[in-house]
Image (cartoon, helix red, strand yellow):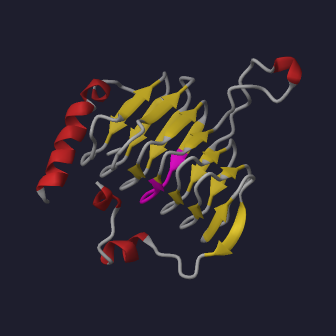
């Protein structure tokens, strides 16, 4: 481990001390961080081992709005300025990379004009393993993003995304299949890892 990773692990441990004593927050070993991770709300937040939360600009915000809510971040995921809000459940798979996107399992307003000030009904969001999500992306409630897919910058995702494709636009649509989906094992063998982006 080089000095950058050692420093990032030390900072990750030190800057998350306020959260480590909470019974509803579990932070696995090896977290990389620089103090730009905020965890709030009454629900559960689980970060699996080796999560990289070192953010270059925006703060990573993991917010639950109800006690039964869960945010689960998979092993070796990379968070770089994302906002995740859950009233029910948001799952981010292993080896994912999330830029400065927003992921919500509910909207802060109802679609019904009569109930506009009432939050929308929560629907779980699942991001499968090895997904890359660009900056200024919005992932809407109820969406599942398939393994190995890429969501391009500024996309707004209203519907499920199949595995192994590139999507973009508003509303997001499939632009093309990936020529050769790279698995986490292949990427590791090529020497690429989310931690390389410190």
* Residue 2, quarter of the rendered image: bottom left
Query: Which residue of the protein is positioned furthest toward the left in this rendering?
Result: 3
Residue 133, given in percent of the width and then of the height, sits at 53, 55
Q: Image point 36% across, 35% down: which residue?
A: 37
Q: Is residue 58 magenta?
A: no
* Residue 15, quarter of the rendered image: top left
Q: Is residue 96 magenta?
A: yes
Could you tell me which quadrant the N terminus lies in?
bottom left
Q: Image point 32% across, 45% down: which residue?
A: 54
Residue 182, given in percent of the width and then of the height, sits at 47, 75
Answer above or below: position of 185 versus 36: below
Answer above or below: position of 118 versus 78: above
Answer above or below: position of 19 versus 7: above
In the figure, is residue 16 to the left or right of 175? left
Q: Image point 63% across, 46% down: which residue?
A: 139
Query: Which residue of the protein is positioned furthest toward the bottom in this rendering?
Result: 179
Q: How many marks?
A: 0
What range is drawn magenta here? 91-97
Q: Nearer the viewer, residue 56 or 128?
A: 56
Residue 9, given in percent of the width and then of the height, sits at 20, 46
In the figure, is residue 168 to the left or right of 32? right
Q: Image point 69% across, 32% down: which residue?
A: 107
Residue 91, given in percent of the width and then of the height, sits at 53, 46
In the figure, is residue 137 to the left or right of 115? left
Could you tell me which quadrant the C terminus lies in?
bottom left
């Amino acid at each position: 481990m080089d000095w950058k990773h050692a420093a990032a692990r030390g900072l990750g441990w030190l800057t998350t001390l306020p959260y480590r004593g909470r019974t509803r927050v579990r932070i696995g070993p090896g977290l990389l961080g620089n103090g730009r991770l905020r965890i709030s709300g009454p629900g559960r937040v689980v970060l699996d081992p080796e999560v990289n939360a070192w953010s270059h600009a925006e703060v990573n915000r993991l917010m639950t709005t109800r006690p039964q809510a869960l945010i689960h971040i998979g092993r070796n995921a990379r968070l770089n300025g994302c906002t995740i809000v859950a009233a029910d459940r948001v799952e981010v798979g292993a080896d994912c990379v999330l830029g400065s996107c927003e992921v919500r399992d509910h909207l802060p307003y109802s679609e019904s004009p009569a109930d506009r000030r009432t939050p929308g009904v929560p629907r779980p969001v699942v991001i499968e393993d090895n997904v890359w999500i660009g900056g200024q992306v919005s992932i809407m409630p109820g969406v599942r993003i398939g393994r190995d897919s890429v969501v391009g910058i500024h996309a707004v995702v209203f519907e499920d995304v199949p595995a192994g494709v590139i999507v973009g636009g508003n509303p997001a649509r499939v632009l093309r299949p990936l020529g050769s989906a790279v698995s986490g094992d292949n990427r590791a063998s090529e020497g690429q890892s989310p931690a390389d982006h410190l």
